[in-house]
Image: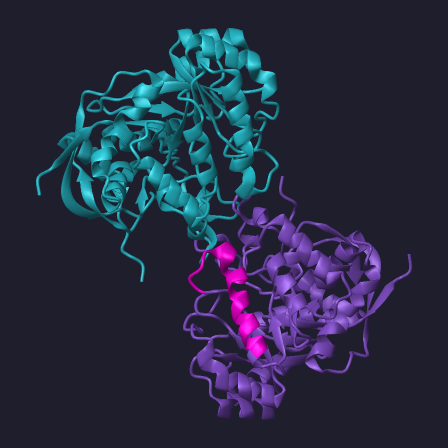
Chain colours: A purple, B cyan
Amino acid sequence: MSPMQIRKMDDMHVHLRQGDMLHRALSHTAVQCERALVMPNTIPPILTATDLVKYRESIIEALASVESFTPLMTFKIVPGTTPAEIHSLKAHGAIAGKLYPDGVTTNSEGGVTDFKALYPVYKAMQDEGLVLCLHGEMPGAFSLDRETLFLDVLRTIAADFPKLKIVLEHATTADAIKCVSELPDNVAASLTVHHLYLTLDDVIGDRLNPHAFCKPIAKRPEDRDMLVKAATSGNPKFFLGSDSAPHPIPSKECACGAAGVYTAPVLLPALIELFERNNQLERLEAFTSEFGAKFYGLPLNKDTITLTEESWTVPDEYHGVKPFLSGSTLKWKVAADKTTAAVTDARATVRAPRA
Amino acid sequence: MSPMQIRKMDDMHVHLRQGDMLHRALSHTAVQCERALVMPNTIPPILTATDLVKYRESIIEALASVESFTPLMTFKIVPGTTPAEIHSLKAHGAIAGKLYPDGVTTNSEGGVTDFKALYPVYKAMQDEGLVLCLHGEMPGAFSLDRETLFLDVLRTIAADFPKLKIVLEHATTADAIKCVSELPDNVAASLTVHHLYLTLDDVIGDRLNPHAFCKPIAKRPEDRDMLVKAATSGNPKFFLGSDSAPHPIPSKECACGAAGVYTAPVLLPALIELFERNNQLERLEAFTSEFGAKFYGLPLNKDTITLTEESWTVPDEYHGVKPFLSGSTLKWKVAADKTTAAVTDARATVRAPRA
């Protein structure tokens, strides 16, 4: 079969980390994506224009010379964020602000509890054309209800700021898909690859599986099926935001396992299999490389990415991080250019399969 | 405050393990319980009268000389169990048979999928006055639905064998409580201590917590509240069966964490706090030491156990196993007799509290 070419992707939600992990993990995203919306929940977080400029520089510095990649920069909206800072952030290249409700995920301590108190911030973002990215979970609620209970917050902000672009990040429930579908065009949702594959049973159904543990937690099979339906529907409100999050293996496998799935290494091959299975391969490129850009008001990427039909086994580990679907065989392989492929391969560790 | 005395408990569902773990963990149960129904999912399992006699001997051998404890022996019902074996098991002291649906919990591979095929076995058990203990989860179903979907199996067997005593083990849902309440008096349910405390959020709500991971998985807050209501209701259909299951810390904290909570060390102190909180302390003794015995047709225990009001911190570890509520402070302490208490204390390890 001849190679497949698709427009390079926009990953509209990714954790690139800092320091050593940034250097080791960035290639997986940069090889497949022309751009990615970089989450600001670093330590310390990206709160100001100064933080943002410095973080962007460190990302660009971490790129291999062969990689053509643009980080789309975001900032973290905290209770102390001011409209003045919003204007400065915009002037320095921010394209979105991310709001984490208090305590709902990794590094979200001290997050927002009073969503209305931030109305001056939303107003400044609306004026500046910045996108509001919401981690849509209600703090303090029972885990399986957190997203559904948050939808009222989404509805209220959307009604009060009809010109503010809002993304419900990593939607996980049929309720969220229905809500976003019904709201006006200023509201969209990003979908991860892992939530298109997993249900709660992958985490707790057999033995405990820390590598499938993420926030929001994967839900029921009916929810997962509705996410797949939305992703493959051709509805421009739903686009890729992988939420790929590299955690070192010990922090996943030991007690108190961290939440997050590292999907970047398999992003496109995993999506191809999913869209093929649903007979919607012709809708893949819009999901990965068009709808997000259009919602964010960005031009479409010009470069393409080449995949060859060449089955490969996802390694157990890349630079100390276990990737999503490790041990599985995937049918399509990202060819990119030879230099980049070599870089990526050199960083992988394939262990002997377990008995 | 003066010490509290209650009749020694019957733990109508416990995993005593084998070999070294049996020797190390047995005291926690033997100090608080006069009797315990010993689960047969050992490796290899207890299938025959010969297995049962040998396992009972190893338990009695493992008892400290000061402990007065009677193991109530069970056997594992598998697709190959025969009525002839049932008669032999009864003759050698079995009081119950435990049925594990295929693959639903620790060591349940090769379990039952065709519940009707075992009708000759249920008939033999009914004739012999043996109790049928059911792990009530439907194989292959979504984890949160497994117990509810199994209730039809329970209803059918109960209708077809009206004189067979049946226990739905470790009930976890409001649906199960309602079902057992409505069925005739030959059907009862055991309740664990951990399911009276935990919800799914204790496993996945914050960081991943392997020590709260068990089968059946803890459910919603409404379910947990209904279990507490049943335990403290004074309804003799609901009695203690702790399902206490010691797993070595590495098998809990590493990838592929095993399911099971080790409640034996805190059994009675934890129950006292719970019943006190619900203003039903006067119903505790019936739940721990009467209803189970009556359902199983056993005389009530004559010995009592003494507790002193003396706050203590549950250790991080007993003989390589992390106990339920480790790090928590409990108000009541089992006094038992000094010899036994010394044995138990000598086996505990208290680590410095974590920051």
Task: Classify the position of the N terminus of chain B by image quarter.
Answer: top left
Q: How far across and down, in percent of the image, does residue B315 sit?
A: 27, 46
In the image, the segment drawn in magenta is A139-159
**Would you identify the image quadrant in which residue A322 lies?**
bottom right
Q: How far across and down, in percent of the image, does residue A125 sit?
A: 57, 86
Query: What type of secondary structure mainly makes up the magenta span?
Result: helix
Q: Residue at x 49, y 17 (%)?
A: B47
**Would you identify the image quadrant in which residue B213 lies?**
top left
**Would you identify the image quadrant in which residue A205 lies?**
top right
Is residue A212 in view?
A: yes
Residue B4 falls within the magenta-colored stretch:
no
Q: How far across and down, in percent of the image, does residue A146 sit?
A: 50, 60
**Total count of labels:** 0
- Left or right: residue A192 compared with residue B347: right
Q: Nearer the viewer, residue A207 or B290?
A: B290
Image height of B190 relative to B57, above or below: below
- Left or right: residue B78 compared with residue B24: right
Residue A142 falls within the magenta-colored stretch:
yes
Q: Residue furthest right?
A: A2
Task: Classify the position of the C terminus of chain B by image quarter.
Answer: bottom left
Q: Residue at x 57, y 64 (%)?
A: A246
Q: Nearer the viewer, residue B46 or A88?
A: A88
Q: Residue at x 35, y 45 (%)?
A: B197
